[in-house]
Amino acid sequence: MPVSIFNPKEHELLMVRGETSFLVAGQACSRFSLCIETQSDEYCQAVWPHHLIAVSAPEGGSVLAALMLFCLVRDHHVPLLVLPKDHPGSRRLRYVVSAGEKILLSCTIARGTHPEQDILCSSTELGGILLEGYLSGIHVSNIPPGVEAGVISLPETIVEASGDPWSAGYGK
């Protein structure tokens, strides 16, 4: 099975796009503890610089919103929320996030209901894609025909906002 290797530079992410859905992913770039909140528990997972953070949009949507969500998790360590199985709100989640060394995209799971960070809800067209984070970059395998993968840049406004808001002119 062919593997595509992407090595995004600073402020760049991998984008995988089908006809109706997409995913953005990038490396964590630093070590931090990511809290995962479930209905009955909280646990924290170590995230290493080569680990991945992926935002899936199974029905499509705003790429800008997905990029902002990526930065909230990577740069600001916003906790991930996990809904109980069969929660009615899972149908309304337009974007879902996973973080870890390997992430498998699956169209057979309910959005936002899996605390395991090695699987992420996707559309049927992206199902089966495997993302792996290495020091050398992001390895992607099982890309189906008709699905494109490439590197995109974070908009400058997001890059500025992910740093110190006062020096970027926000909050003044």
Image (tube, rainbow, N blue to C red):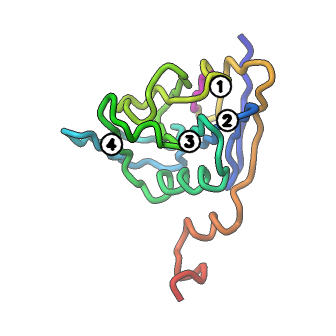
Asked whether the beta carbons under mark 4 and mark 1 sit within 8 Å of each other, the answer is no
Q: From the viewer's perspective, is 147 left or right of 85?
A: right
For the point 65% across and 51% down, which residue is it? 62
- In depth, the one of 120 and 4 nearer the eye is 120
Q: Is residue 164 above or below residue 34?
A: below
- Secondary structure of the residue carrying tag 1 is helix
- Mark toward the viewer: 3 or 2: 2
Residue 115, by quadrant, is top left
Provide residue 104's location: percent of width, then percent of height: 54, 23
Main secondary-structure element of the magenta-colored stretch: strand
For marks 3 and 2, give the CA distance: 11 Å
Asked whether the beta carbons under mark 1 and mark 3 sit within 8 Å of each other, the answer is no
Q: Earlier in the sequence, mark 1 or mark 2?
A: 2
- In depth, the one of 72 and 164 nearer the eye is 72
For the magenta stretch, what is the residue range?
Answer: 129-133
Asked whether the beta carbons under mark 4 and mark 3 sit within 8 Å of each other, the answer is no
Q: Earlier in the sequence, mark 4 or mark 1?
A: 4
Residue underneath mark 4: 36
